[in-house]
Image: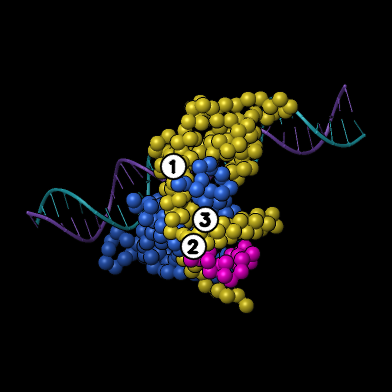
Chain colours: A blue, B yellow, C purple, D cyan
Amino acid sequence: MPSKQRLVLDEFLPYRLSIVTNRASAAIALHYSKRFGLSIPEWRVMAVLGETPGLSARQVAERTEMDKVQVSRAVQSLLAAKRLTRGADKDDGRVARLSLSERGLAIYREVVPLALDLEREFLSVLNAKERAALDATLTKLSLSLNRLRKA
Amino acid sequence: MPSKQRLVLDEFLPYRLSIVTNRASAAIALHYSKRFGLSIPEWRVMAVLGETPGLSARQVAERTEMDKVQVSRAVQSLLAAKRLTRGADKDDGRVARLSLSERGLAIYREVVPLALDLEREFLSVLNAKERAALDATLTKLSLSLNRLRKA
DNA sequence: GTTAGATAGTTGCATATGAAACTATTATGT
DNA sequence: ACATAATAGTTTCATATGCAACTATCTAAC
C-alpha cells in the first residue's frame, strides 16, 4: 500500500533537501569566498579547527564528512596561505596535528559572526517551535540515513 | 542580542543540511548509478522529463536548479544512450523539445519505485506530524533562501 | 527591413573532484 | 625480531564542473 506511485520532484524529499542545501551553501559561500578567497572545503576545515584545534586530517575528514583527499588539498592551500599550522604528533609519526594560525584565527573570528548572521537570517521565517522541530527531525534523518548507508 | 556567538558545526543549520542531503543523495545515486549508469544530473533530467515531457533544456535547468551547461551535457549523453528524444519546437528554432524515449521510459519506470522506496525508508523514522512539519519547513526555507539569493 | 540586443544551447578552457595507487609509519601475529 | 596487515596522508590520473566565449535564432526599436 504505497502512498505514492508517481514521482513529483517538488514533493520528493531528497530533491527538496538538495535545493535548500545548495541555496544555503551558495549564499554563505558567496560571502566568505569573495571576502577571503576561501573555498567551501577550506572553510569547513577552518570551521572544525576553530571549534576543535589540534585535530588530525583524518579527524577533520570524519567530522566534516569530507573526502580525505579533499581535506589534504584544503589543508595544503591553507598552509600555503599561512592560515593553518601543522605539527607532528608526539606518539604517531604518521599523524599531523592541525590548528588555525593567528592569521587563520583572525579570519575565523570574522567569518563566524557572518555565518551565524546568515543562519539567523534565513531561520527568521521559522518560529521557535518550528526550529526545534526541524532540529529534531534533522537529527533523526541523519541517523536514519547513516544506517541506510551501512546497510 | 545574538543567541549564539560560537559556531558549533553540529548545530549549524547549513552544515547539518548538507550532511543530510549528501547522505540521501549518495544513498539514492548508489542505486541508479550502479544499475543504469546514470549520473545524478542525468537522473534529474530524466526525472523532470518523466514528470513533464516536452520541456526545453532551459526549462529542465530551471526546474532542477541545475546549470544549463550541466543540463546540456546530461542531455547529450542521454541522447547518445538513446534514452531521450529531441525534437524541434514548431515556433522557435532555437528550442529543442525533450522527452524520454521508450528506452528512457523503461528505465524511468524502474527507478521511480526504487527512489520512492528509499524515500519511504528513510522517512520511516518520522511520524505523520513530523513529516508534515518538515514539508512545511522546507517550503518556507526554500522561499526564504530564494529571497536571500536575490538580495 | 535593418540593426542592436536578448535568448537557447554548445564548446573551450581552467579548475575541482574522487578513486586508486603510492609512501611512510605503526600495529599485530608468530 | 620479522613479516604482514593496517593506517595517515599525498599524488596521479581520469572525469566532472562551471564560467566565459561562441553560434544560431528570435525580438524590439527605429
Taking depth in this image into account, of D23 and D2 the one nearest to the observer is D23
Asked if residue B48 can be seen in this view, the reply is yes
Residue at 40 percent across and 36 percent down: it is B35
How far separated are the C-alphas under marks 1 and 3? 32 Å
Q: Quadrant of residue A57?
A: bottom left
- Percent x, y for residue A110? 58, 68
Query: Callout 1, which amino acid?
Result: Leu
The C terminus of chain B: image quadrant: bottom right
Residue at 64 percent across and 29 percent down: it is B97
Q: Which residue is mark 2?
A: A137
Residue at 50 percent across and 38 percent down: it is B43
Query: Callout 3, which amino acid?
Result: Ile
Mark 3 — on which chain does it sit? A
- Which region shows up in magenta? A117-136
Point out the frontmost of discs 2 and 3: 2
Query: Callout 2, which amino acid?
Result: Thr
| Label 3: few (<14), some (14–19) or many (≥20) C-alpha neighbours in 10 Å | some
- Percent x, y for residue B127? 47, 60
